[in-house]
Every structure is written in C-alpha cells, then in structure tokens.
Amino acid sequence: MFKRRARLLVAAAGDDGRADRVAELAAQDRDVAEWLEVRPRPAMGELAREDLEWADLLVAVDAEAAEAMPAGRPPGCRPKYWQLPPASVLHDDPATFDEATLSALTCMAGGMRMLARMDAEDQPEPQ
C-alpha cells in the first residue's frame, strides 16, 4: 500500500527553467499532486546527496540531462528519462511545453493510481 506520494526530483542539464515549470505544473494539477511530490533542481550536476536520498525517482528532462545523471544514486532513487521540449519552447511556446509536461506527469500519476488499486485488491477481505 502506498503510504505517501512518490517523490520526483526533476532536473535539466543546466538551469534553463524547465525543472521549475515541471514542479509548478505538478502542484497546479490536483490529480497529479495527489500522487506525486515534485522538487526541481537547477542542474543535474549540482544535485546534493540529500536530494538523491529524498527522491524515489530522478527525472531527467532530456537526453543531455540523462547523460549528466549521477551514477552514485542510492538504491531507492531510480532514474527516469522524459523527452520534454527544449528550453526555447518553454519560452517561445509555453503551451506546447506545458502540454508535453502534463502528459508525462499525468501518465506517471495514473501509473501510481493503478498500482495503488492493484495493491488494494491484493489486501485480504476483513472477516
């Protein structure tokens, strides 16, 4: 049974604003916020050990961020890779960036919801 929201640590390769926007969108969507706690970090290379110990998932927003992921993650911090639009899209066409981001977030929250439902079905019936 899930006792808390999944903790996502989100970072790009550099501080380009995308990780902050992912966290903003996650907090604004009630269904996503019910299942996910999202913390942005300015850059993948600047992650502290405490960040990694907090996170269930370390989310790279693109291939460059995925390459910069630290190898020495704690066992409970799994890597996740999203192919979000580049930072230029965030600034030039924010609706496109937001749509791609919300799609990734709602997909993850939906997966959490499904796992929780399956977990509840596995619980024995009270006698």
Image (cartoon, rainbow, N blue to C red):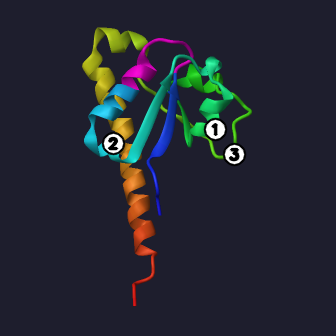
The residue to which callout 2 is attached is 32
Is disc 2 placed on a helix, strand or loop?
A: helix
Packing grade of label 3 (10 A; few <14, some 14-19, many >=20) is few
Residue 86 relative to residue 41: left or right:
left
The residue to which callout 1 is attached is 53
Residue plotted at (26% across, 41% down):
30
Packing grade of label 1 (10 A; few <14, some 14-19, many >=20) is few
Residue plotted at (39% across, 9% down):
88
Rounded to the nearest whole Å, what is the CA distance between mark 2 and mark 3? 25 Å
Indicate which disc, 2 or 3, sits on the residue closer to the N terminus: 2
Question: In x, y percent, where is residue 38?
Answer: 44, 34
Give, as a single range, the part of the protein colored magenta.
12-22
Rounded to the nearest whole Å, what is the CA distance between mark 1 and mark 2? 22 Å
Indicate which disc, 1 or 2, sits on the residue closer to the N terminus: 2
Question: In x, y percent, where is residue 55?
Answer: 56, 38
Which of the pair 94/57 is nearer the observer? 57
Residue 70 relative to residue 54: left or right:
right
The residue to which callout 3 is attached is 75
Assign the C terminus to one quadrant of the image. Answer: bottom left
The amino acid type, in three-letter code, at marker 3 is: Pro
Question: In x, y percent, where is residue 26?
Answer: 35, 34
Is disc 1 placed on a helix, strand or loop?
A: helix
